[in-house]
Image: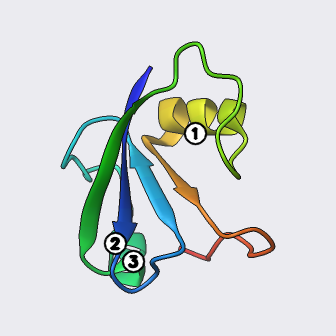
Amino acid sequence: MQCVIYKGTQKTDCYLYVKVKDDFSEVPESLIAMLGDLEFIMNLNLAGRNRLGYADIEEVRRLLDEQGFFLQMPPGEGYPDL
């Protein structure tokens, strides 16, 4: 599974994962507004990986499939109300 990772200019400690580069159609507008301008970080192939930094890779895969995006928050921070 391929994904694309971005960081926002207003929340540089958060990372947004989407399935297709520059396709934010499944990301709530309130989340985009919270993050600010999005800066491309990298393309990432999740296939064959069993670890992914601070994020649970199974949750990343599941949420990409179910909702079309995943938001990685800094350790200890809760998910924002959207």
Residue at position x 73%, y 41% in the image:
56
Name the residue that disc number 3 marks: 35
Left or right of residue 18: residue 80: right
Asked whether the beta carbons under mark 2 and mark 3 sit within 8 Å of each other, the answer is yes
Give the vertical position of 11 relative to 49 (above or below): below
| Crowd rating for badge 1 (residues with CA inside 10 Å; few <14, some 14–19, many 20+) | some
> Looking at numbered disc 3 in the image, what kind of residue is underneath it?
Leu
The quadrant in which residue 13 appears is bottom right
Disc 1 target residue: 63
Residue type marked 1 = Leu
Q: Alpha-carbon distance for marks 2 and 3? A: 5 Å
Residue type at numbered disc 2: Ile
Which of the two labelled residues, at mark 3 and mark 1, occupies the earlier sequence position?
A: 3
Nearer-the-camera pick, 73 or 24: 73
Q: Position of residue 4 (x, y in %)?
A: 34, 41
Query: Which SS class for mark 2?
Result: helix
- Closer to viewer: mark 2 or mark 3: 3
Residue under label 2 = 32
What is the crowding at mark 2: few (fewer than 14 residues within 10 Å), some, or many (at least 20)? some
